Image (cartoon, grey):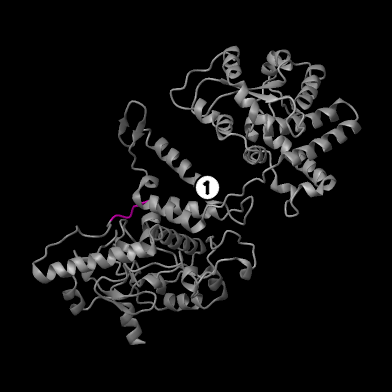
Amino acid sequence: MQMCTSMFMREPHFGLVQCMNLSPLRLFFLLLTSPGITALGLSETGPTRDLLLSCWTPSIGDQSSMDEMNFLTWRGKCLGCKKMITDGRGIFCANFFTSKGPFPRCHVVYHGACYRDYEGSPFPVQRTLDEDEEEEERGFEVDEEARKVFMHGRDGDHVMGVCFECDVCHFRNIMRRDVCWVSEKDLTKLRFIRRASLDVMWSRQTSTVHANFARMRRDVREAAEVMTMGHIFPRMGNPDMEDKCGMEIATIMLQASLRRGMYASHLQFDTTRKTVSWAMNAWSAVMRGEDGTLFASDDRTLFSSESPTRSRWFQRFVLGMKRRMGVIRKQDEALTSAQILALQEVGEWMWERAEGAAERKEIANIMAFVVIGFCASLRGEEISLVSMRGLLAFWQDTIQRGFIMVTLRGRFKGEDNLKWHLSPIVDITSSGIKVRRWVHRLLFLRLTEDLVEEGPLFVNSAGNRARMRDYNDTFQQYIRLAMDRSPSTFSSKSEAEDFNLRRSLRRGSTTQSHNNKTPPATIELMNRWRKREAARGAEPGLEMRQVYTQALSATQATLEYSKNL
């Protein structure tokens, strides 16, 4: 008992309080063995003192062999396997020889393979493009080494361009206190810090890390053999308890990534990274816009910023997270001309059986939306910009010419003024898609039932401009009916949910045009107007008649597009 008492009276490590009373110590060990603490993560599969705090103290011999200014001479005991690491190999915490705030020197070091994510980690790792496939059907074989990617560090990761601090040092930077080892939230925080640090490391490939570390060691060793050497770098370490790299925002971003996504059990990376936007906006607001220096040229304005989300460490974290999660885009299934005709048959069948103007208006809304989007190669959100005033202005004039002039009225992102875009579409395509019929039916109902001649063509029940989502569910119901009536037109593997108004119409239109040998220049003319008209320095919004005159000059080329569908 005397020996235990004297050991506990030694200089305390990492903020432990010196104490003669052993009852708190006994209570602590009882807590470690309780089932509740195991559930909190204080097991071999979660953060523990033993895995995160070093009790190793350098001997006199160790001290004499190490130069605090030369990390290639450092040595210490790995917190994972408990074996000695010498000659600066492994992954050393930057505070190995630096006291942070009231805490003693860190002395934390790991072998690369020992610094790994915890078992049962909830963070998604992309191993295959089809996560729901059976293991034996996933195509390319994934060897054991590939399965470990993103799950552990590599020797030399601590000198790859960004500072590496151990998990506890990062915790102290964020919370400005020590870890409470019986707090579930503190242990969860440590899990997230470990994942963020690994993501930073994996922003660089293993071959790059190994090559960089090996070349550095060789160059310094060979130089030291032939000449005296001074200190190459300043002292490593961060004595301040302050989160300058953005670890706190990184852990919040990791938590956001665990939310359920639309098509997967977690959010996709492109959605997750929106956390960075609000963090940067809030930082600038707190700094009252005085953060950083303004750099301006003739056409661009840039600001420097001290926001943690603009640090090199955080940029590495975002890149590593992107590589770990992968970028999976679920594309809308492309519609073909034959499938549009099947939808048209469904529309006609329902039109004949409709009772009352309200039902017919609902049918005309869907069908006009579909034929305009497909024949004009528009995205779903663009179709709702069709203007009644524009359609009516040129309706009679275009009847004689055999086409309708689809008129969009809206504001491009980043522009201050409204613009017109006009796109001519043939009345009936070569495959038999009846554009004018469906647009005429909707126009007639809007004029006679709604008694309006202005505003958007597509409106919701409240009379406001309709959104794509207002029609998408009904559109998928039409797809199901078309599949039942014309099963040979659709792939047996396709489902109605694979088709959406956002991209199915435009993707199908472009694909069908390529299959029908439409000249590439014509396809480019139809699909690149957004980029041309939204370009910086473009002319201001013109009157509708002026835009109409310009559109007529290119009518022959643009009509060829819809005619071939």
In percent of width and height, residue 222 lies at: 16, 69
In which quadrant will I find the N terminus?
bottom left
Residue in front for this viewpoint, 491 or 558: 558
Based on the displayed image, in which of its 4 quarters is residue 159 positioned? bottom left
Residue shown at 18% from the left, 66% from the top: 220
Residue shown at 72% from the left, 26% from the top: 459
In percent of width and height, residue 371 lies at: 72, 32
In percent of width and height, residue 512 lies at: 66, 40
- Please indicate whether residue 163 sits to the left or right of residue 349 in the image: left
Q: For residue 242: magenta?
A: yes
Q: In this view, does 402 lie above or below 498?
A: above
Q: Mark 1 points at which residue?
A: 270
Residue shown at 70% from the left, 44% from the top: 499
Q: For residue 421: magenta?
A: no
In which quadrant will I find the C terminus?
top right
Residue 75 visible within the image: yes
Callout 1 amino acid: Asp
- Please indicate whether residue 556 sits to the left or right of residue 75 in the image: right
- Please indicate whether residue 35 sits to the left or right of residue 339 in the image: left
Based on the displayed image, in which of its 4 quarters is residue 141 positioned? bottom right
Q: In this view, does 340 lie above or below 212?
A: above
Q: What stretch is highlighted in magenta?
A: 240-245
Q: In this view, does 283 lie above or below 320?
A: above
In percent of width and height, residue 293 lies at: 30, 34
Residue in front for this viewpoint, 433 or 18: 433
Main secondary structure of the magenta stretch: loop
Based on the displayed image, in which of its 4 quarters is residue 135 positioned? bottom right
Residue 105 visible within the image: no
Q: Circle 1 — which element?
A: helix
Residue shown at 28% from the left, 65% from the top: 213
